[in-house]
Image (cartoon, rainbow, N blue to C red):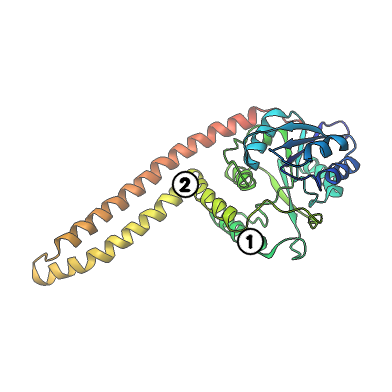
Amino acid sequence: MNNLDIAVLLPCHNEAGAIGDTIEAFKNALPTATIYVYDNNSTDTTVEEAKTAGAIVRFEPRQGKGEVVRRMFADIEADIYIMADGDNTYDATIAPELVETLIQEQLDMIVGTRSKKKDSYPIGHILGNTFFSKLINNAFSSNLTDVFSGYRVMTRRFVKSVPVFSDGFQVETELTVHSLQHKLPIKEVPTKYISRPEGTKSKLSTFSDGFKILNFIFFLLRNVRPMLFFFALSSLFMLASLGLGIPVVYEFIETGLVKRFPTAILASSLGVISVLLSFTGLILDNVRQSRLEINRLHYLALTKNI
């Protein structure tokens, strides 16, 4: 492990009260690692605190954690990447163990899952994380417990093959979905989640960011599971078509007359839309498969450093 180039990536926005302790914790845990702090338009003394603590400070002017992660992944060259938040809530002491596990088990990503203690992790976040984790698990037949954890250890091959499209806190979900979609070897490892330092405030809003994440997950499902997405829509239209059309057909069988032409036309239209949505799902699923093959070849073309 000492021969590997390890980069610790800390995206930050107004974390002056915690960034210094975060950097010190990772320096003590991984003395040979290079620590990068990417400042995202902080208005406090985050930059000064990070420089004083000995980190390399860089800047991303476009607001949003996803924007920062995309920039970090593009800029930094290393063998192993450790990503955490700059609020000192993740346990840095377990980082060497996570790196060793990544190497020994030949994984592409390890996710440090967080403890669910209410005093350190808000109940609203726990419920939201559980809901979205189950949603992802059902869509990809997985068994993950913390899809939103920001504590991740990744290989160079993973980092350089994941196209980050999200701009906010959805980025953790995107990393998880990318690994599941491409069937990459990942593992969850339980870690201690520490309460935020006194005087600091979480940037994550349970409801507004939760809605953004839900919207992003549906966007991802449309792109990575188009058959499931469009077949679900098709089923809704078909149910509506049958609900409106069956009484009209039954009436026609009994009387030989179609007395409700508008209803019959609407039912037929909904049925046609349902069929079109089904074919759309089939076509897009073939496109998705071709895209997956190209992405897989790109992933395999990258040098395996560990």
Residue contact between numbered discs 2 and 1, judged by CB atoms under 8 Å = no
**Of the residues shown, which amino acid type is indicated by label 2?**
Arg
Q: Nearer the viewer, residue 27 or 237?
A: 27
**Res. 107 mark:** none
Can residue 1 be seen at all in this image of the molecule?
no
- Residue at image mark 1: 130
**Of the residues shown, which amino acid type is indicated by label 1?**
Thr
Determine the residue positioned at 70% across, 28% down: 75
Can residue 95 be seen at all in this image of the molecule?
yes
Crowdedness near tag 1: few (<14), some (14–19) or many (≥20) residues, C-alpha within 10 Å = some
State the SS at label 1: helix
Left or right of residue 77: residue 131 = left
State the SS at label 2: helix
Q: How far apart are labels 2 and 1 at the CA level?
A: 21 Å
- Residue at image mark 2: 222
Residue 177: image location, x then y, percent:
59, 46
Quadrant in the picture for residue 16: top right
Determine the residue positioned at 59% across, 61% down: 131
Quadrant in the picture for residue 236: bottom left
Residue 275: image location, x then y, percent:
31, 50
Residue 212: image location, x then y, percent:
55, 51
Q: Is residue 262 above or below residue 106?
A: below
Determine the residue positioned at 76% across, 60% down: 115
